[in-house]
Image (cartoon, helix red, strand yellow):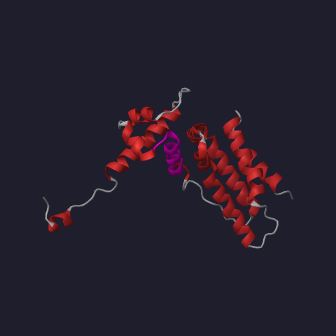
Amino acid sequence: MATATEAQHIERRPGGRSARVRAAVHQAVRELLAGQTGDQLTIPMVANHAGVHPTTVYRRWGSIGDLLTDVATSRFSGDFVVPDSGSLREDLERYAADLARDLSDPDTLALVRAIIGAGGENAEICRAERQEQLEAILEREHARGNELAPSIERAIDGLLAPLYYRAVFTSKKPTPEWARSLVAHLLPD
């Protein structure tokens, strides 16, 4: 048994087993979604691919929806820079074009579709971070006194909804050019 002095010298490894398990499970989800053959993603399938016991995955995440949400949260957070050019039109065009590029990425699209397929409240993660970014752009404009800036509801209907609809439910990719045209409809001259 370690004495108090010896215990003070024991250093914890950064990350440790929990971080390794999380990384392996996240990697397994991404790989399985990338190679998806139409099979429904399951926790035993993910656990087997990650080389961990299914109980470990169930204990940590509880359901496939919660696991997908965790993977999405780590994937979606921090990827976007909220533009601040001083021009609402330019900021929204850059935001929409960046989101279109992100939703055109096959790995991102597979993850979004899987989360929607898992159903429940986990689908909120697909748009929540992006909505917060859009809100930041609009709130900044309102704070600058721009009374012509649209409401968040109008911006969601004019930008987020068509981008996600085209990416998830059609075979057309949401191109940056098309996404910028949405801004023209949202902010007519």
Decide if residue 51 is on the left or right side of residue 102. Answer: left
| Vertical position of residue 42 compared to residue 159: above or below | above
Residue nearest the observer in this picture, 90 or 170: 170
Give percent across and percent down for residue 167. 68, 40
Q: Residue at 37% x, 50% y: name it.
A: 19
| Vertical position of residue 3 compared to residue 131: above or below | below
Q: Residue at 49% x, 43% y: name it.
A: 67
Q: Is residue 180 visible?
A: yes
Magenta span includes 71: yes
Magenta span includes 153: no
Residue nearest the observer in this picture, 155 or 63: 63
Residue stretch rendered in magenta on the structure: 62-74
Give percent across and percent down for residue 86. 71, 67
Q: Is residue 177 visible?
A: no
Residue sticking out furthest to the right = 189
Residue nearest the observer in this picture, 117 or 77: 117
Give percent across and percent down for residue 179. 73, 47
Give percent across and percent down for residue 185. 83, 52
Q: Residue at 69% x, 55% y: name it.
A: 94
